[in-house]
Amino acid sequence: MRGARRDDAEFTEFVTLHSDRLYRSAYLLTASPHAAEDLLQTTLAKAFAGWRRLRTTDDPVAYTHRILLNAFLSERRLRRSGELPVEDVAGRAADTGTADALASPDPSGPAGVADRVTLTAALARLPALDRAVVVLRFWLDLSVATTAADLHLTESAVKNRTARALRALRELLADDPDDPADSSAAPPAAQPAGLTHDLPRSTP
C-alpha cells in the first residue's frame, strides 16, 4: 500500500512537470486541441500502467514521448486516413502565411502567434508520417538516427521525408495571394521555430 501511494505521488509529480510539453507534442501531431487531449490522456494512461518500469528508464520523459508517438501512429493506421476532420483543418487553413513562419524572429509577439497558427495549419495538411518526422526532428530536437529508430524508418528515409515535408511546408506557407512577401526569397527552413510556445487547449 505504501509503495502504491509512493508510485501515485511520483507519477502525479511527473505529470505536473511534463504534461504541458507532452500536450504540445500531441497538438503538433494531431493539429486538433480535442484530439491532442485524447492522445495525451491515452499516453498518460499507458505511462501510469507501466510506471514502475518506466520510471527506471534512462529518460522517462523521452520514453513517454515514444508512447505518445506510437499511440498517434497506431490511431492513424486504424483510421487509414491522412486527413484531419474538415472542421479541424478548415479553421486553420484560412490563415495561410509566409515561409517566414518557419523561422519566426519573435515567436512570443503577435506576429509569432499568427505564424504558429499558420504553421499548425500547414502541418495538419502533411501526411501523418511526414508530420511526425517534422515534430520529432524540430520540436523534440531528436537526431536523424533517433527519429529513424522511433518511427521504424531508415535514416535515409527520415532525411528524405524531412526534406519533402519542409519543402511542402514552405509551399503551403507561401500560398497566400495577399502576402506581399516574395516566397522565392524565403530562407531555407533549417528549423521551424514556430513549433514552440503557446498552443490552444480544448475546453470541457
Image (tube, rainbow, N blue to C red):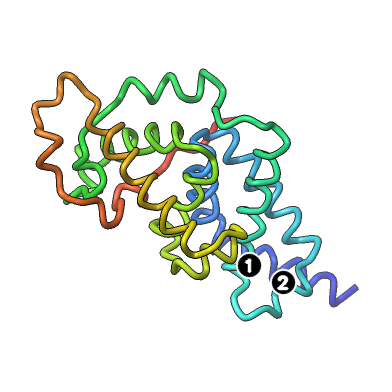
Q: Amino acid at mark 2?
A: Leu
Instruction: Determine which quarter of the picture holds residue 7.
Output: bottom right
Q: Nearer the viewer, residue 77 or 117?
A: 77
Q: Is residue 187 left or right of residue 80?
A: left
Residue highlighted by disc 2: 54
Nearer to us in this view, 181 or 197: 181
Q: Looking at the picture, how far across and down is residue 53, in whole percent? A: 77, 74
Q: Measured along the vertical axis of the image, is residue 54 above or below residue 80?
A: below
Whether the residues at callouts 1 and 2 have beta carbons within 8 Å, the answer is yes
Q: Is residue 197 left or right of residue 46?
A: left
SS of the residue at dot 1? helix
Residue 87 position in % (x across, y down)? 51, 19
Residue ID for mark 1: 63
Residue located 48% across and 45% down the image: 130
Q: Nearer the viewer, residue 201 or 46?
A: 46
- Residue 168's label in the rendered image is none
Residue at x 29%, y 56% (from the top left corner): 191
Image coordinates of residue 197 in percent, x first then y, are: 35, 50
Measure the C-alpha gap from mark 1 to mark 2.
7 Å
